[in-house]
Amino acid sequence: MTSSRFTRRGALKAGAIGGAGLAIPTILRADGHTGFTNAPTGSTVKIGFNVPQSGPYAEEGLDELRAQELAVEHLNGIGDGGMLNTFSEKNLDGTGILGKQVEFVTGDTQTKSDVARASAQQMIEREGVIMVNGGSSSGVAIAVQGLCQEAGIIFMAGLTHSNDTTGKDRKANGFRHFFNGFMSGAALGPVLNNAYGGSRRAYHLTADYTWGWTQQESIQAATEAIGWETVENVLTPVGAGDFSSYIAPVMNSGADVLVLNHYGGDMVNSLTQAVEFGLRDRLVDGTQFEVVVPLYSELMAAGAGSNIQGVYGSMNWNWQLPDEGTAAFTRSFGEKYGRPPSGAAHTCYVQTLLYADAVTRAGSFNPCAVAEALEGFEFDGMGNGATTYRAEDHQCFKDVLVMKGAESPTSEFDTLEIVEVTPRAQVEYPEDHPMFAGGDLGACNPGA
Amino acid sequence: MDAIIIQILNGLDKGSAYALIALGLTLIFGTLGVVNFAHGALFLVGAFVAVTTQRLLKISYEVVDESKKDFLGNPLVVDTPYVHGWFGQATGDAIIDWAVPLSIILAIPVMLFIGFAMERGLIKHFYKRPHADQILVTFGLAIVIGEIVKAFYGANPIQTPAPSALRSTVDFGVWLGYEPNSILYPAWRLVYFFFSAIVIAAVFAFLQFTTFGMVVRAGMADRETVGLLGINIDKRFTIMFGIAAAVAGLAGVMYTPILSPHYNIGMDFLVLSFVVVVVGGMGSLPGAVLAGFMLGILQSFASMNEVKAIIPGIDQIIIYLIAIIVLLTRPRGLMGRKGVMED
């Protein structure tokens, strides 16, 4: 026999305990006393690395995590200092940030917007992180950036290439070091013109989400500007696996260039299948058929194997650059992990150092002071030449790389070669450019 | 017309993979009454047997090449496969080149063993449990297998190319009287189609023309009566589970040049194959094959730009749309037995 112990008094008690429990995260922030969310009070400061540790981009997330861990070591004075030695600013001396040793927690985005938001929220509310960094997807970046804006936390985006991240979805608390679709188009256009001429007919296969749409729009604009015609743009589901049904119609479309606006596993599969269908051996009215992959990643290039040989694309950064900053970072990373860093790793590493430097220059962890220090900030020595964090949209402007699949790779890391370092001036655009219109940074939110 | 022919070929190719997985899935349901959501994981394991074979054949010793530098500026360490030393470079390269077909030799015993182990170690304990329990435990097992594969091989897709002799395209149009180069189709996809047809025919022949197959079919129709005749039907069903696992594994092995394997590839196929089984009729082997090819072809047609222009997004829902229609009008599926899935 059972009896119910549910009483009015018990319900009130449970409600009070539950309410206190829900309030704990807010109380623990301790920010009410200092004016901003998660103000560090002890001898340490905690930052959050929110990267894909499972799901299709887990390898890229792992590489980001390696770089982030390395950045923390360098900030805390461990190791050879990496890019701290080449960074144009000399405020960071290996004693942490403003004298506080740097600690970090990690979260798994699973490359899903809702999971990434939940992970970032947990890091902010339970772990008390002062900044969130990382990620390998524009959908995730936009979602987490929105959360950080609401929470009063600085978001230093990882790999996000959609125009929208610093376009219509820009936020005052969010900063992007990585380049974007427009920049890829601006860099690739002239190179494609030189390589393939100005009277091509392009067929686009495009990943059906924010990144794919904006990259396709950018590449279409850039190629039409050099005289190419766009035959068709077909949206493909993310993770389609077998793209043969989408590739087969290309053959009799009259197109002589296939632009694959795909990333990650989708890029590997669609490129492999395009090669399998003989597109790269095809002649269209006497013109050699070509394939273009506007956004490259070393890790994905390795997955595509020999299929990428001679295929043009673009990158934010590559370990083969000859500058001192790149050499310093590649040496630190390579000696610790036995492999060169990826572009995603580089951007996360640099973003962590840039945040630390901005805090030091601002003399405060207050996100609004940090944002002010980053806005319009000009720096060098981080691998991309002279760089500016534009105040109006929080987008970094710097040189962009045009890459090509290596014709005769000598090792597993030697899959891509640098064709051209496109100067920054060529990829710049006004902040009210139509492809970035509709956004508003809004006011910086310190939280609390 | 040429575009339609290419999409039919694509559909047959996709349908081959769906049919092979669905065949095993429905075989297990028909014999053991188990809804095996880990069946996609068997396709995954098969695919990674091909990856493993490729890696085994590429096992190398290191040679330092002082004339070249690695990314840190140190002398480059060059990997030289042992098969080069054993058979000479040309023969060694040819062996590595044929890694995918060669992996069939390894895949059959490995998949049979995994099938037996899965059935004896886990699934037999769920025979008398509700289908919901079976789905939960096998789905969980599929996730575990996927994560184990990820731990060993990473999350990125791994290139496992077809032999170079079969990487070209076949001028299919010429066979049908069209202009040369109007209908080119990848040779390996045709190989996959014929391979699937042979495996499917072999499974049907095994069940139709052998005593073992006759007992299994009798067991599928009336397990209790066969048991009363003194035949150990459980043992035969366990063997059928192993054969179903081998069929799914072979489908995975041969699919690797078409779709670079990654740890989640099994899940990608599982859902589709399950729909194929439901449409074909749970427990019906001819139904699984028919539905596999039919849905593969319909999916390919739905991806055509002309079709998508009329019904946007149809390529992503066509299979499920067909499943809904079939389940509403004929709950037992196209060739399902009366009474199965109808109550």
Image (cartoon, rainbow, N blue to C red):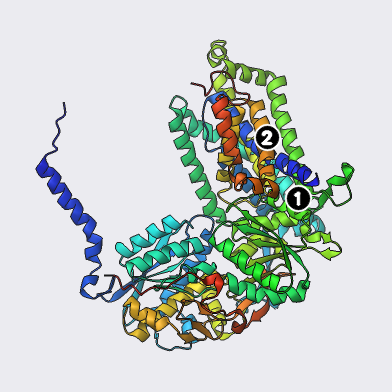
Task: Choose between A49 and A221: the one closer to the eye.
Answer: A221
Chain name for mark 2 = B
Q: Are marks 1 and 2 on the same chain?
A: yes
Task: Choose between A295 and A224: the one closer to the eye.
Answer: A224
- Residue B305 coordinates in the image, percent (x, y): 69, 50
Q: CA distance from mark 1 to mark 2?
A: 31 Å
- The quadrant in which the C terminus of chain A is found is bottom left
Task: Choose between A188 and B215: the one closer to the eye.
Answer: A188
Mark toward the viewer: 1 or 2: 2
- Residue A36 coordinates in the image, percent (x, y): 28, 73
> Which residue appears at 17% of the width and 49% of the height?
A15
**According to the image, label 2 marks what residue?**
B294
Is residue B98 positioned above or below A348 on the image?
Answer: above
Earlier in the chain: of badge 1 and badge 2, it is 1
Secondary element under disc 2, as helix, strand or loop, is helix
> Which residue appears at 52% of the width and 82% of the height?
A382
- In-image side of A8 versus B44 (left or right): left
Q: Is residue A51 visible?
A: no
Is residue A376 positioned above or below A346 on the image?
Answer: below
What's the residue type where badge 2 is placed? Answer: Met
- In-image side of B104 versus A129 (left or right): right
- In-image side of A190 versus A121 (left or right): right
Chain name for mark 1 = B
State the image quarter where residue B156 is shown. Answer: bottom right
> Which residue appears at 54% of the width and 67% of the height?
A162
Secondary element under disc 1, as helix, strand or loop, is loop
Which label was assigned to residue B98? 1
- The quadrant in which the N terminus of chain A is found is top left
Query: Residues at badges 1 and 2 in contact (C-beta under 8 Å)?
Result: no
- Residue A102 coordinates in the image, percent (x, y): 35, 75
